[in-house]
Structure formats: C-alpha cells, structure tokens
Image (cartoon, rainbow, N blue to C red):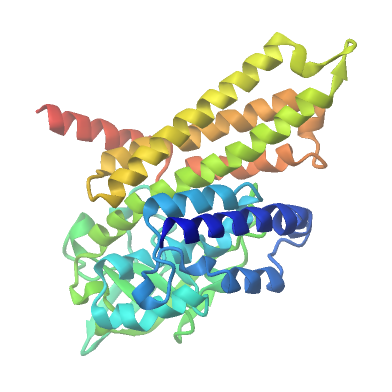
Amino acid sequence: MDSETFGLLKDQLSRYVEERLIPAEDMVEDIDDIPADIVHEFKEMGLFGLSVPEDYGGLGLTMSEESQLVRILTRASVTFRSLIGTTVGIGSQGIMIDGTEAQKAEWLPRFATGEAIASFALTEPGAGSDAASLRCSAVREGDHYRINGTKRYITNAPRATVFTLMARTEPDMKGASGISAFIVPADSPGISLGKPDRKMGQRGAKTCDVILEDVLVPAANIIGGVPGQGFRTAMKVLDRGRIHIAAVALGMADRLIDMSLTYAMERQQFGSRIGDFQLVQAMLADMEVDRLTTAALLERTAARFDAGEVTARECSVLKLHASEAVGRVADRAVQIHGGAGYMAEYKVERFYRDVRLLRIYEGTSQIQQTIIAKSMMREKS
C-alpha cells in the first residue's frame, strides 16, 4: 500500500474510533458483546484483512503499518480489537506463514473479507505456558485424523469459522516434536463449545472451551502438509503476535494518558488543579516515559521484522516491556483519578482491568523473561 493511501486509511480509522467506537464502549461493556452493525462495519473497512496479502484480497500491510493501525484502534476499548485480533494474527498466520498454496487459496480470501473468522486453539486445561505438553490427540485413520481433546480460553471461539488447532500426532514423541497444526472448520461434527468464560475484564471479547470428540479432519488439513511441524508454526505465529500485542498496549497507554491528563487539568483540590502538584506531575511524567520507550521499541522491532531481521528474543523483549509498561500506566491513571478511578463510571477503572490480560496471553511476562535470558546465554556461550 502506498503511503498516501495508508495515510487516508489511518485518518479514516482515527475518525471511526473517536466518533463510533469510543461512544459505543459502555454498551459493549453492558451487553458483553459487540453489536452486529459494528462487526459489519469492520468488514466493510477491510479490518479483518490487515495482514492478508493483496493477492488474496487483503490490505497486505507490513508489520509496521499494522502496528500503527492497531495502536489507533485500541484507543477505544480493547474489546473491539479482539473482534479481528485472531483473524489478523495468530488464527490466520499459521496458514499464511506455513500453509500450502491450496490452503492459502481456500482461507485467506475469506479471512480478508471477514466472511471467515479464525481462532487459535493451543492452550489446554493442562497446557498453557508449557505448550509442548499438550495432550489433545490426533490419530491417523486412512486419509483422516481423529481428534480428541479440550482447548481452553480460546478467543473468538463462539464466533469462529475455523480453528488453527494444535494436536499431538506422534504420541511416542515427547515435547514439541510430535505436535501438528490443523485447520479445523468450526462446524465439524464432534466440536462443541463450553459455557462463555466470565473474565476480570475485556467484556465483549468472547472466550470459552472448545471440546473435540472424535472430530474427523482430512490429513490434507495439516498446515503445510507435514506432520510434526505444528509447534514450530505456533512459535512463528507467536513471535509476530507479540509485536501486535505491543501495539495494543501502546494504544491503550495513549488513551489512559489522555484521560489522566484531562482529569489532572480539571480536578480541583486545595484551590488548585491537581495537575499543578509535583507528585501528580511525576506520575504523568513516568507514564510518558513508558509510552515513548514502548513506541520506540515497537517501531524498531516492527521495522526489523519487516526486513526479515527480527529474532524471537527481540519480540519477547518488546512484548515484556510493552505489557508491563501499560500496566504501570493504568495503575498510575487510577491513582491520579483517586477514588473516582475506582468507580465504574470512569473508564480508567475498566482499562485497569482490561490491560491486566496483556501480561498473560501470547506468552506471560515470565515466559518472555525465560526466552530472553536463554537467548542471551546461548549467545554468550
């Protein structure tokens, strides 16, 4: 996409966020869902196709461009981003990165228009951070696999058209080697959904268990056509997703800082606006430091990713820093608002709950620390 067209797209999205999405936040929180008309508008704007190449009907954005749009989008409730997040990111990118040409041709055009919504099914009741220990099984029967197991906390599962699903095809192989990535249509016989999860935050973002009982999937639905490569595919997808999550964190920080500045400049105490008190200024300054360092690291990492230079360590550094930084920003936002910040009528209370998940999904902060340290030691040895 040329720079002029991309600039127009950014301007359009900025207006949409301010005029349409932010005013709809309270309704989404109350009904715990995103209205169908907003879903339709996302499709009309091409937001489901941010990462799909133009050859397949998408916008074909670079990681740097996608990050800029995600930052704008997440000035509004992060719930809206969840609507497209798995289709733009971890749900589709396994097919995009490692899929066969036939798999890409079948699914990518449908993702681009929003006709199909992708979901990523890796986590299980007994396998989260230790993804290599997953137990969901896929047993070969002729030209099909029979899949059994339960997936947990699966984002967009109730909306999904298809799951990028990890299952163990080689039961005798320990760890990651025996895991394959499957394309599993959500309407396959034997798939059922658990009750919707009740979460601390991000109301309107749909997650639940996905239960698979004797689900038959063609062997041709293994991503890339090669069994045993699923864990590698998942890790490639997560590296990219961690850049995306950093952009989410940055957009939320933008909104939190904006709300905090407005409040600090309007709220009066002791005859002065609280923004004139140095300890409040210190909190605002710390928030700005976290925002600017996140923005700089995101810009660098996304550019290196687009150039094919980025490493898993850099993605982990970015995700760790961004998710921890926005947590600090949210905490200070509540503190600046004082008692009002603890009340649901002020949106910093909601953002405070919503940002907490960023330090958990797509690799916890502790997993990122482990990845970073191990990489450092390998480099040193």
> Looking at the image, which residue sits at the far bottom?
142
- Residue at the image point whose x is 57% and y is 28% from the top: 328
Q: Residue furthest front?
A: 4
Q: Identify the residue at image location x=45%, y=55%.
A: 66
234 or 256, nearer to the observer: 256
- The vertical placement of 69 against 93, above or below, is above
**Quadrant in which the N terminus is drawn:** bottom left
| Residue 335: image location, x then y, percent | 71, 24
Question: In the rendered view, does 37 fall on the left or right side of 89?
Answer: right
Number of numbered discs visible in the structure rendering: 0
Image coordinates of residue 156 in percent, x first then y, are 54, 66
Q: Taking 77 as reference, is 169 left or right?
A: left
The quadrant the C terminus occupies is: top left
The front one of 195 and 334 is 334
- Residue drawn at x 56%, y 33% as measured from the top left: 327
359 left or right, relative to 317: right
> For the view shown, which residue lies furthest in the left direction?
381
50 up-or-down from 111: above or below? above
The picture quadrant where one finds residue 354 is top right
Above or below, 305 relative to 233: above
Tell me if I can see residue 321 in this picture.
no
Q: Position of residue 330 (x, y in %)?
A: 63, 33
Closer to us: 143 or 111 = 111
Q: Residue, x 59% and y 37% (percent of image)?
A: 253
Tell me if I can see residue 3 in this picture: yes
